[in-house]
Amino acid sequence: MNINGRARVFGDDVNTDYIISSRRKRETIDESRLREYLFEAIDPSFAASLLPDDVLVGGANFGCGSAMEVAVTVIQSAGIRAVVAQSFARSFFRNAINNGLMVVECDTSSITEGNRLELEIDGSSVTVRDPDRQLAFTGASIPPLMQAILAAGGLVGFLRGGGRFEQGG
């Protein structure tokens, strides 16, 4: 799987209320309506500036705060297929995988706004490249079960397609 897009860079501790405001979530949780408010607390013009396949880039603890999965689904509704960050809040990470949003943990400190990124997922290995600056970052490996869930478009698709969780012994 390969994902290519323009980097949209945020810093550390991107709270889910920065992704989509609690005020907006009280009005509706329909992600197709919420996507126009994506990151409005940080940059009111952000949603309108998105291009197809932009890649979100964060620092440490991306997606902290509320565990509401609408923070993930509104990102997807806006056309974003991947988030790359130094680290993720566990609930955001689980919600992303369960909804089929690619999340990659790697060093993001030298990625800047607007850089062209290429994400290459080959088996469990992940490489994030900035071809214009000839940089490459190795992402945390993706276990086979997570790969299968992502390939199915999320947990529901995985289970509908006959996916199973093996019993450990």
Image (tube, rainbow, N blue to C red):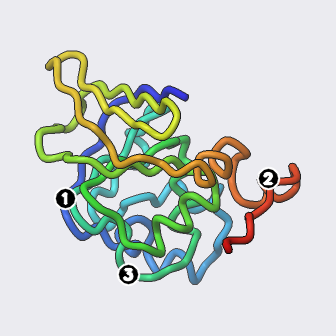
Of the numbered discs 2 and 1, the one sitting upstream in the chain is: 1
Q: Is residue 32 above or below residue 29?
A: above
Of the numbered discs 1 and 3, the one sitting upstream in the chain is: 1
Task: Check disc 1 and give the amino acid type.
Answer: Gly
Q: Nearer the viewer, residue 64 or 148?
A: 148
Q: In which quarter of the image is residue 73?
A: bottom right
**Pointer 3: what residue?**
65
Q: Which residue is drawn at 50% across and 26% down?
A: 2
Q: Is residue 49 above or below residue 98?
A: above
**Pointer 1: what residue?**
11
Image position of 114 (left or right of 1): left
Residue 82 visible (yes or no): yes
Residue 77 visible (yes or no): no
Q: Which residue is drawn at 36% across and 62% down?
A: 40
Q: Where is residue 123 in the image (x, y as percent from the top left)?
A: 52, 34
**Pointer 2: what residue?**
157
Local packing at callout 3 (Cα closer than 10 Å; few below 14, some 14-19, many 20+) is some
Q: Nearer the viewer, residue 69 or 85?
A: 85
